Image: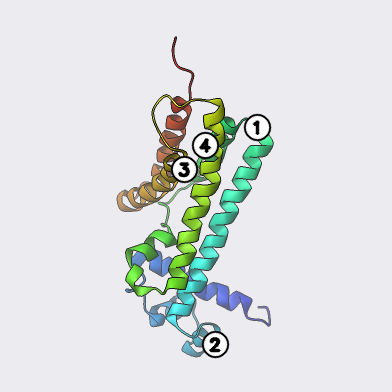
Amino acid sequence: MPRDGTSTKTAIMDAAERLILDRGFAATSVDAIIEAAGITKGTFFYHFKSKAELALSLVQRFAEADRAHLEDKMARAETLSRDPLQQVLIFIGLFIEDLVQLTQPYPGCLFASFCYEAQLFDTETLKVIDEAMWEWRRDLGGKFEKIFERYPPRLEVEARSLADMATVAFEGAFIVSKTLKEPQVVAEQLTHYRNYVELLFAPAES
């Protein structure tokens, strides 16, 4: 174990995230986290002054991972195609490729879990979630704006709304997958989203 305690801190955060996604933040006590992580109370408070500080660290870590997924998959899509429509279709397809391999229901989204109990968190913690939502809208919405320049949509729609639809598809699918215990739901719903985007910008029949 590293002398700086990185592994212990990670273990605490991993245990806390699992419990919060399963029970919610309010129902996850510090004692439960301590037991799940296999540590002492002193060790917990050495790494985190409070449960609120842990919450901020968790959501910051989740946001960093979320941002990496967004940036990495968009960069790969841009490498594979120069056409903005194909880039978006590839971008969504890369997520589908990952999610179709799930053998257990997706555990959920920490952003959504925290939003359901927003009254429990400070402004700094909620701001992290807000910024993450804006990143998806800005980056994916920018791609849709470029698509509009080349491919007039067959229905009236806004780039911002189409970008938000990706987040809605993810979050809604997470809930259905977890509730029905069906791991394939997330990939299926993203496939519907991809199909919709493809059909929306298909050439009009003459």
| Label 1 Cα crowd, 10 Å radius (few <14 / some 14-19 / many 20+) | few
Between the residue at mark 3 and the residue at mark 2, the CA separation in whole angstroms equals 41 Å
Secondary structure of the residue carrying numbered label 3: helix
Mark toward the start of the polypeptide (3 vs 4): 4
Q: Residue 46 carries which label?
A: 2
Q: Nearer the viewer, mark 4 or mark 1?
A: 4
**Colouring rule applied to residues:** rainbow
* Residue depicted at x 43% and y 58%: 109
Measure the C-alpha gap from mark 4 to mark 1.
15 Å
Q: Is residue 143 above or below residue 18?
A: above
Q: Residue drawn at (44%, 39%), measured in percent from left and top?
A: 162
Give percent across and percent down for residue 57. Answer: 52, 72
Work out which residue is located at the far top of the displayed protein and give it: 206
Query: Which callout, 3 or 1, points at the residue further toward the start of the chain?
Result: 1
Helix, strand or loop under label 4: helix
Q: Name the residue under label 4.
A: 144
Q: Can residue 161 be seen in this view?
A: yes
Mark 2 surroundings: few (<14), some (14-19) or many (≥20) residues within 10 A: few
Q: Mark 2 or mark 1: which is in front?
A: 1
Instruction: Give the crowd class for mark 4: few <14, some 14-19, many >=20 residues within 10 Å.
Output: many
Measured in 3D between alpha carbons, the distance from the residue under mark 3 to the one under mark 4, in whole angstroms, is 7 Å
Q: Which of marks 4 and 2 is nearer the N terminus?
A: 2
Residue kind at label 3, given as amino acid type: Ala
Badge 3 density bin: few <14, some 14–19, many ≥20, Cα 10 Å: some
